[in-house]
Amino acid sequence: MQIPNSITYILDRLEQAGYEAYIVGGCVRDALMGHKPHDFDITTSALPEETMQVFSDMRVIPTGLKHGTVTVLYDSEPIEITTYRIDGEYADGRHPDEVRFTRSLAEDVSRRDFTMNGIAYSPERGLFDINCGAEDIRRGVIRCIGDPDRRFGEDALRILRALRFSAVLGFEIEKDTADSLRRNKELLVNVSGERILTELQKLLCGANAGAVLRSYPEVFAQMIPELAPCIGYEQHNRYHSLTLYEHLVEAVENTPAEAGLRLAMLLHDIGKPLTQTEGEDGQWHFYGHAEKSAELSGNVLDRFHASSALRLRVHEIIKYHGMVPENTDKFIRRRLAKHGLSMFRDIMLAHIADDSAKADFARERIPVWQDIIRRAVEIDSQKPCLSIKQLAVNGKDLSVLIPPSPKTGEVLKFLLDGVLDGRFTNDRDELFVQARRYLDEKTE
Ligand code: ATP
Ligand code: MG
């Protein structure tokens, strides 16, 4: 197992002082899977004060003494060392009321969530794996350590972690664990919106996200009640062969693995059941569903305490996912002026994802949407004039034609419209000519 020098050094020092020290959890799991761990957690038999004593010649920060965590700075790299511990009762279904330190590694790994996360390793002592986590990793299985009902009852975040690991690692959730997770889904009310959002974003970006969304719809509806009416909802529309929930999932799968985009696709049609009407031909229509879905997505993201940037991004993608784009420079410039390149690209990616999840004939439009993105990137790279500020003339320049007044703004707006439409070039002389013509016509 490849362990950075800084970590080996810390493990050695603890061992030399007469304590046990291991790396544990996600880093061991990732290493056993052949992935490079993104951080290393150290667990030790030394009590926090003892750890601080061992590293008294280094900078030590008592980051979470109550939970037994001490951070040692090695060449300004922070390394977390946590004392073996047992978690007490979980009265709130989320956090242990108290933690107790122990000298037994077996007790420490048994408080951890899944067998794959309960493996410890020390260069000196080798692998410590009393829950057969390595075997579960080899077989690609997520399994609670101990009784799943009890473990999810202690901390409901584990429900979401199981789904997230399944989505990201492509592992199956073992049957007892999966059944229990479904049975205990209501416990998710104990998990804060922020934590749900963090896990959900990682989950949605997992390569296996679609399969997880399909296997546990009722759990997702527990987190996002707006999804409940979408499950099993037939759309009775010739564009759609899938139920609404299946369409949402397929749209997620057809979007680049980027949290904001995937979240937007998961929610992009949640307003449909509320806007449903039936045409004379028996086809169902959902007029105004994009606006409605955007509005509902705002409620969802407010409950999750999302950043305003994420909230806005998701809202805009959903609001405009149903517009009918034209593959013309004029249309593209107008959209760049309104949304900016990044948001416009997101909106077009949403079109591609949406159409990919519809009946075959809707997919014919996808190459056009791809062309529009390409052309938008090209146009944007030429630094076009997209706002009044970027016009080659300003209000002051125009004062030779008209005294400054609200009319000045009107003229500038007229000039920008012409430039965006490609009727005028953004050239000072030309814009003066156009401004004069506009004013002459107005006064006639
Ligand atoms: P990653 O860091 O890749 O998201 P991880 O498994 O390392 O995955 P962390 O949140 O870093 O997740 O937690 C480190 C370890 O702490 C886990 O591997 C697990 O052993 C334990 N752990 C984390 N959260 C919980 C929890 N809610 N219940 C029980 N054990 C947990
Ligand atoms: Mg980790």
Image (tube, rainbow, N blue to C red):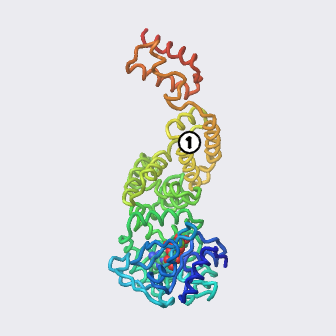
Residue at 52% in and 78% down: 55
Tell me which corner region of the image, top left, top right, bottom left or bottom right, holds residue 306: bottom left
How far from the left and from the top, in percent, is residue 136?
A: 59, 83
Q: Nearer the viewer, residue 259 or 282?
A: 259
Tell me which corner region of the image, top left, top right, bottom left or bottom right, holds residue 47: bottom left
Q: Is residue 166 left or right of residue 274?
A: right
Residue at 60% in and 76% down: 7
Question: Relative to residue 26, is residue 410 depicted above or below?
Answer: above
Q: Is residue 224 left or right of residue 205?
A: left
The three-letter amino acid code for the residue at tag 1 is Leu
How far from the left and from the top, in percent, is residue 444?
A: 43, 8
Characterize the local packing of mark 1: few (<14), some (14-19) or many (20 or more) Cα atoms within 10 angstroms: many
How far from the left and from the top, in percent, is residue 186?
A: 37, 73
Q: Nearer the viewer, residue 244 or 75?
A: 75
Q: Is residue 162 visible?
A: no
Residue at 39% in and 78% down: 66
Q: Is residue 123 visible?
A: yes
Q: Where's the N terminus, which quadrant? A: bottom right
Q: Which residue is mark 1?
A: 341
What is the number of callouts on the image?
A: 1
Per the image, label 1 sits on a secondary structure element best described as helix
Question: Relative to residue 249, is residue 124 depicted above or below?
Answer: below
Q: Nearer the viewer, residue 361 or 228?
A: 228
How far from the left and from the top, in percent, is residue 31?
A: 63, 76
Q: Nearer the viewer, residue 186 or 427?
A: 427
Q: Residue furthest left?
A: 91
Q: Residue furthest front?
A: 57
Question: Relative to residue 156, is residue 394 depicted above or below?
Answer: above
